[in-house]
Image (spheres, helix red, strand yellow):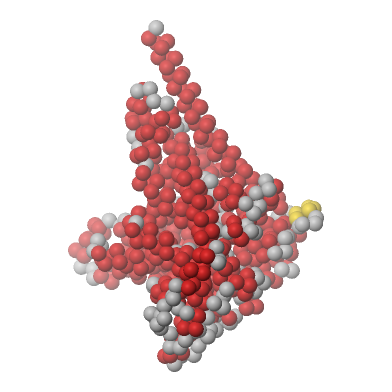
Amino acid sequence: MIVPFIWMISTSFKLPGEVISFPPHLIPQKPTLEHYIRVFTELSFARYYFNSLYIATIITLVCLFTSSLGGYVFAKFKFWGQGVLFIMILSTIMMPSSVQMVPLYLIMKKFHWLNTHYALIFTSLISTFGFFLMRQYMYNIPNELRESALIDGCSEFGVFWKIIFPLVKPALAALTIFVFMQSWDMFIWPLIVLDTKTLYTLPVGLATFSMQWWTNYALVMTGATVSVIPVLVVFLFMQRQFIEGIVLSGLKA
Amino acid sequence: MRAKEYIKHRKKIFSSQAFFILSVLIPIICYYSVFKWYPFIYAIILSFYKYTLRSKHFIGLTNFAEAFTEDSIFLISLKNTVYYVAMIVPTEIILGLIFALMINRLQKRKSADVFRTIYFLPVITCLVACCITWRWLYQPLFGLFNIILGSIGLPRLKWLMSTKTALLSIAVMRIWKDLGIVIVLLLAGLQGIPRTFHESSMIDGANRWQTLIYITIPLLVPTIIFVIIIEVINTFQAFSEILIMTSGLAGSATTAGGPLNSTITVVLHIYMRAFNYFRMGYASGLSMILFIIIIIFTIVQLRISRIKWKY
């Protein structure tokens, strides 16, 4: 199961000559860091990392906020048109991304957002799935909390911010992981939208880099390793939350 | 006096409530309108147009006719996609079930954690990195797989280079990557089965195999159907892995789609028509066909799952 990863890491430390040596060695006999240095200096991986990181962070924070607000309003209030609106939001889950690819591209063109990060961020600002998750979770929060806070003179926003928000932390944690991973992994959309290399996110940068340098296998494997390590490390420390997040997402979807 | 104050206070709460609701809903509605609903409608309209860089005019159903009659690559891509899904989903379910059952027996022991890391690691790694690594493993001359095959004495395969094995190779990678999620979902389903069923069957004298076939699996069927729906919808839209694993050198996407188009999938075809050939209207038409296929499949699946499985 993890053999591909082991091989990937092992190859990344090999000198080019040793990569294609026969018989292959698991532990390189002359390990080298030259690929790692090269990947970060010459090949602007640091730039890709930075792009992916800040885009994913923005998207995650906004999504947390909008999902919980939206879920709260749908869970705890009754208003005119609630059912219709809910079904319309539900319907967006059924729209495959391939259908939205082309029109979104044309819309981004009209906004002059092509080849910018705006196109990446704005198309992922609200997570429909996150909205459902939050709504589901908030159903279980007793109404009395809200009512007593209101009687005590709290504003509606205050109720949300001070009382409801802290209570949904577990669901928020799961949602954070889910949304962050999703936006980190985005490949098709950034590929379509971005043209300038300095704007690339990590998946796109990694893909074009590997195509360009394919014959230098060790270098390519280094790129792959470097992309994988952060998520790996976070995962090893936060296994439980990770999997709970995925399960929650799978069950609630 | 008291009543008046009370009514005023209620009105105040009501209007601030209305304000709150509106200030949350209006941005949400605006966002969905611009980025979700309008694009969808736009896609439907686009599919009836010829929309290229030079011209845009209404052509009715010509796009759809062309897709099924003249565009041989589209039909090939449909066939490939169906093969792809057929290779992946049953394998994932069977393997996932085996592993989930095995891991379920471990309950809360430490070894369950270790296994969980192992099977979940591929899920959380970047798809691009996985594809690149597997492409390297599949390399005919220097890749690990062929080296192992060669050293045992088995013939070396051409993996991604051969029309016969290319799609299969990508499918294997996809199974490796997605198995973790399937296992996790099936495990959750398994753990949702009340223990009373197992206990009563043991009292009745059933052995483990019988319990498995007659109790566990039937009770797990709703979960299995759910997993099937999710996996089919996801795999049907496979794009990234095909593109990365079959693209040519120097970043050109011209060889994407495998040798002789043997690995091209529907979404990849849509992507190439839209962004390499800039035939937006036609690509929209294709995506509509894909959408209808997915909807039909989902409805069929949901109908099947409505059959009562209560005991």
Q: Residue furthest bottom?
A: B153
Question: Can the viewer see residue A202 in this picture?
Answer: no
A210 sits left or right of B176 in the view: right
Question: Can the viewer see residue A43 in this picture?
Answer: yes
The answer to which image quadrant residue A204 occupies is: bottom right
What residue is shown at x 44% (from left), y 14% (from top)? B8
Q: Which residue lies furthest to the left in this view?
A: B203
B309 sits left or right of A126 in the view: left
Q: Where is residue B121 in the image (x, y as percent from the top left)?
A: 39, 65
Query: In this view of the protein, which residue sits in the foreground, B271 or A166?
Result: A166
Q: Where is residue B287 in the image (x, y as percent from the top left)?
A: 64, 58
What residue is shown at x 32% (from left), y 60% (from top)? B190
Relative to B28, does residue B92 appear above or below in the rendering? Answer: below
Task: Locate the N terminus of chain A and report the quarter of the image it occupies.
Answer: bottom left
B105 sits left or right of B22 in the view: left
Relative to B110, does residue B155 appear above or below in the rendering? Answer: below
Relative to A241, does residue B28 appear above or below in the rendering? Answer: above
Query: In this view of the protein, which residue sits in the foreground, B286 or B162?
Result: B162
Q: Where is residue B174 in the image (x, y as percent from the top left)?
A: 48, 69
Q: Position of residue B239 (x, y in %)?
A: 57, 65
What residue is shown at x 61% (from left), y 63% (from top)? B267
Total numbered labels placed on residues in the image: 0
Query: In this view of the protein, which residue sits in the foreground, A113 or B282?
Result: A113
Query: In this view of the protein, which residue sits in the foreground, B310 or A118?
Result: A118
What residue is shown at x 38% (from left), y 80% (from top)? A27
